[in-house]
């Protein structure tokens, strides 16, 4: 027969549990774990707590045991395993600033160009596929270079500047080269 776990809270612990449970930024998993402790304090058995919360009995036992050993700190999630991300928030902010500046001049960037810029300027090595995932996750907007000038119609000043550049190129092409 499994060992019985029961959390008998003091008045101070009950007050802290209620305060933690009312926090607006509380993760749903942590809220369920606090509820496990509260229901155990009320006198419910592990099987009944598991049934009410829709979790396995072993899960209830695990967190009641952690609470009894470590207190409220035992209910928190463990840090996620693995290496920390290569691109920091400062790197992504610099990338966002670069894209904002490029948007004002009408310059476009591809994901491989952005990855090369990160490697060159910020010393962050990311594959283009990973960079695309990060850009989408942070709702950045970038675009592939196209041969269309449809995007210029939205900005008349930019359109006039590009038309002047185009005329200059045509003029240089038609004029004879002194030789």
Image (spheres, rainbow, N blue to C red):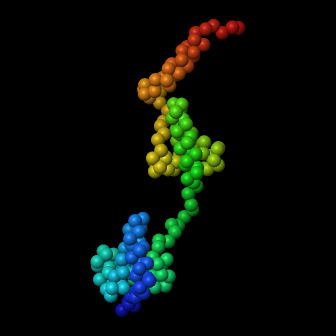
Where is residue 113 shown, x and y percent of the image? 57, 39
Q: Is residue 17 above or below residue 25?
A: below
Where is residue 48 shown, x and y percent of the image? 29, 83
Looking at the rendered structure, the number of numbered marks drawn on it comes to 0
| 2 on left or right of 102 | left
**Residue positioned 47% across, 37% down in the render:** 143
**Residue positioned 49% across, 32% down in the render:** 145
Depth check: 96 or 169 in front?
Answer: 96
Image quadrant containing the C terminus: top right
**Residue positioned 58% across, 9% down in the render:** 174
Determine if residue 108 is in view.
no
The image quadrant that residue 64 belongs to is bottom left
The image quadrant that residue 49 belongs to is bottom left
| 88 on left or right of 135 | right
The image quadrant that residue 37 belongs to is bottom left
Depth check: 146 or 166 in front?
Answer: 166
Image quadrant containing the N terminus: bottom left
Depth check: 146 or 142 in front?
Answer: 142
Where is residue 24 shown, x and y percent of the image? 40, 65
């Amino acid at each position: 027969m499994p060992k019985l776990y029961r959390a008998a809270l003091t008045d101070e612990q009950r007050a802290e549990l209620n305060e933690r449970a009312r926090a607006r930024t509380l993760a749903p998993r942590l809220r369920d774990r606090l509820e496990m402790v509260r229901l155990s304090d009320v006198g419910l058995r592990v099987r009944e707590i598991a049934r009410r919360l829709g979790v396995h009995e072993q899960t209830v036992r695990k967190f009641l045991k952690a609470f009894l050993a470590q207190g409220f700190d035992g209910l928190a999630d463990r840090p996620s395993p693995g290496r920390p991300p290569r691109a920091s928030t400062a790197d992504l902010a610099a990338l966002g600033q670069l894209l904002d500046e490029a948007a004002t001049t009408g310059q476009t960037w591809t994901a491989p160009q952005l990855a090369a810029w990160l490697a060159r300027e910020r010393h962050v090595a990311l594959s283009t596929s990973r960079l695309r995932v990060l850009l989408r996750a942070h709702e950045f907007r970038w675009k592939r270079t196209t041969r269309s000038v449809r995007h210029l119609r939205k900005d008349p000043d930019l359109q006039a500047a590009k038309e002047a550049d185009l005329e200059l190129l045509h003029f240089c092409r038609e004029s004879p080269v002194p030789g």
